[in-house]
Amino acid sequence: MLVDTHAHLNFNAYRDDADEVIRRSLANDVWMINVGSQYETSKRAVEIAEKYEKGVLAAVGLHPMHLETGLVKIKNDSEEIQIKTKEEEFNYEKYKELARSPKVVAIGETGLDYYYRPKTKVKIQEFKEKQKKAFLKQLDLAKELNLAVIFHCRVAHQDLIQTIQQSNNPTIRGVIHSFVGTKEQLQEYLKMGFYIGFNGIIFKKIEGIDFEENIKIAPLEKILLETDCPYLTPLPAVASAEASAKPLTRNEPLYVKYIAEKVAEIKKIDYQKLSEITTENARNLFKITA
């Protein structure tokens, strides 16, 4: 069994066949957590999860790129949403109501994202502060409901680390989703007790990032597997599709097996053992009992 701890079958890319993709995954003993990025996709994640007795769970949260700041223009992703949406403020009570579903196992994805930002120093600072404020509110919600947190971070690791440390929330637990950072930043997150999420990005080359070294450093008991589908399709899945003359256009939970294979290879352990450990990790963090 494997658990894809970060999927987005609640996104527009699966509007026509989400149930088919889910059934295919469950038939191959792959469970999944569909993660919200704004209120509508969070709501959809809950609705999808509630259709299944087991194997399909949800997380609800406001991604920093969907936060209303008035300082940057939102970039709509056709794979994520069906229609153009307005940026939103984080509504604590609305998300709290969604999170009361027994299918919700985490708040997220939430965090900091400085990839797209204003031009001037004054506006950049305001932009960062607004993100931090919304992020801290979501940490408060996770604390109130005793839920894990799925952290998103892009070009902001030091700020994320400092903001979490200053949040006065010592019981917070969570995973650094799609970790792309240095080994020093990795070690900081591990010291804070967080899990580390690895996905198809580990097959890419990014200047200054050594994914293999990060996987070697991360203890097995702190590793989670994810796809971030429909994005970041693992290269072996792409190669397999090309070999069978079936072009692959999107990722899906079933391909989490390629992440497991790669991590097992780097860790020099048996694939089955890696599967068992990471599945147990997911159960422990998200309190999955079924």
Image (cartoon, helix red, strand yellow):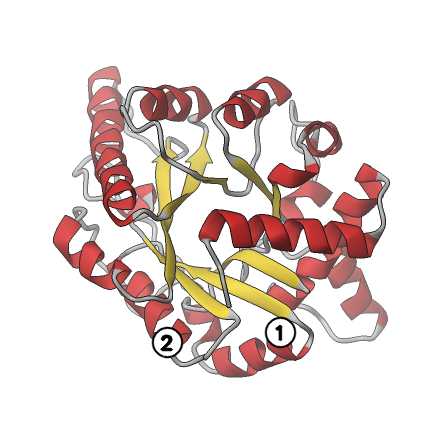
Total marks drawn?
2
The residue that label 1 is drawn on is 25
- In x, y percent, where is residue 85? 24, 60
Q: Quadrant of residue 114?
A: top left
Q: Where is 78 relative to 112, above or below?
A: below
Looking at the image, the residue that sits furthest to the front is 289
Q: Quadrant of residue 174?
A: top left
Residue type indicated by callout 1 = Ser
* Rendered-image quadrant of the N terminus: bottom right
Q: Nearer the viewer, residue 197 or 247?
A: 197
Q: Where is 212 relative to 178, above or below?
A: above
Q: Nearer the viewer, residue 77 or 31?
A: 31
Q: Nearer the viewer, residue 65 or 5?
A: 5
Is residue 183 visible in this depiction of the protein? yes
Circle 1: element type = helix
Residue depicted at x 51% and y 68%: 290
Q: Where is 289 relative to 287, above or below?
A: below
Which marked residue is nearer to the observer: mark 2 or mark 1? 2
Is residue 252 visible in this depiction of the protein? no
Residue type indicated by callout 2 = Glu
Q: Is residue 244 left or right of residue 29?
A: right
**Tag 2 and tag 1, C-beta contact below 8 Å:** no
Circle 2: element type = loop
The first of marks 2 and 1 along the sequence is 1
The residue that label 2 is drawn on is 50
- In x, y percent, where is residue 31? 57, 67
Q: Quadrant of residue 94?
A: bottom left
| Mark 1 Cα-neighbour bin, 10 Å: few <14, some 14–19, many ≥20 | many
